[in-house]
Amino acid sequence: NALLPNATAIPPDFLLLLMDRYGRLVDRKLQPNNDGLLKSDTIIWNANRLRGIVLVKAITGALTALLITAMPGWAQDSARDRAVDLELAFVVDASGSIDDKETRLQRQGYADALAHPKVQKAMGSGFLRSVAVSYIEFAADGCAKLSVDWMRISNQAQARKFGAEILASDRMFCPGGNAIGEAIAFAATSIESNKFEGTRRVIDVSGDGPNTVGPEVEPARDAAVALGITI
């Protein structure tokens, strides 16, 4: 505490974040559930590892601030633009089973949620007080698209702008099933190739049915998880 007085202020969920991102700190026992997907039955860690994560988080935050401060002005701006607490890809069902009314409903839901005070508070709770988000829609095989490109959100005005772009994006029409495996692979590639660098990287999938066409879900999921992405 004398050396790192801010260590006690580290958000508890960041401990889990680091354990998710770095498999060496987590011993997961995975068993198949009824639908054949893997689930995390247990997450085992010990107090020493937790203390180590707290120390790493405190040191990392301090070093990041020092390094950015030591950079030339143009480099500082670039580093700040890239660094975020979270890269979040919304992967949303836009297949033929989602009609116009449901499309508006789910898009409005995302727009409203991002601007909600509780979500804004959560976004501001990290060290960098910002997240990067994108809105990806999927339908049949070969139809996944980046409907709203990656955007940094650090305040309500930016959240409302992103929400407005969701609502204004063209309606996808690509019937033929749900290619969820392809959508996950598409989102993982988008996370890998965007200009942001997040402490945590997440793909959030929503839909009204199982994978019916295209690549299988399990290999796509495993490949994304191997990249340090949480689904």
Image (spheres, rainbow, N blue to C red):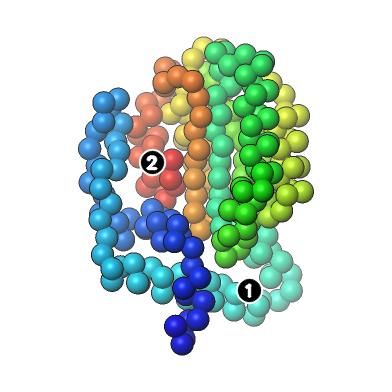
Image spot of residue 115 (x, y percent): 69, 44
Which is closer to the viewer, label 2 or label 1? 1
Residue at 48%, 81% in the rendered image: 4
Does residue 134 sit above or below 168 in this rendering? below
Residue 196 appears in the rendering: no
Question: Is 198 displayed left or right of 156 in the figure?
Answer: left
Residue furthest bottom in the image: 2
Q: Residues within 10 Å of mark 2 (few under 14, many from 20)?
A: some
Spot occupied by residue 30 in the image (x, y as percentages of width and height): 24, 42
Q: CA distance from mark 2 to mark 1?
A: 32 Å
Badge 2 or badge 1: first in the primary sequence = 1
The image quadrant of residue 40 is top left
Which amino acid lies under the numbered mark 1 shown in the image of this protein?
A: Ile
Tell me, for residue 59, which label it has, or none. none
In the image: residue 186, left or right of residue 123: left
Total numbered circles: 2
Q: Is residue 43 left or right of residue 113?
A: left
Q: Are marks 2 and 1 in contact (CB under 8 Å)?
A: no
The local secondary structure at tag 1 comes to helix
Q: Does dot 2 land on a helix, a strand or a loop?
A: helix
Question: Could you say which is closer to the camera, residue 14 or residue 131?
Answer: 14
Question: To which residue does mark 1 refer?
Answer: 68
Confirm whether residue 153 shows in the render: yes
Question: Taking 60 as reference, is 100 left or right?
Answer: right
Q: Which residue is mark 2?
A: 223
Mark 2: amino acid: Ala
Q: Residue at x 49, y 54 (%)?
A: 200
Name the residue at the front extreme. Answer: 118
Instruction: Name the residue located 31 percent from the left edge and 61 percent from the top edge.
Output: 25
What is the crowding at mark 1: few (fewer than 14 residues within 10 Å), some, or many (at least 20)?
some
Of 193 and 231, the residue lying toward us: 231
Task: Tell me: residue 138, above or below residue 84.
Answer: above
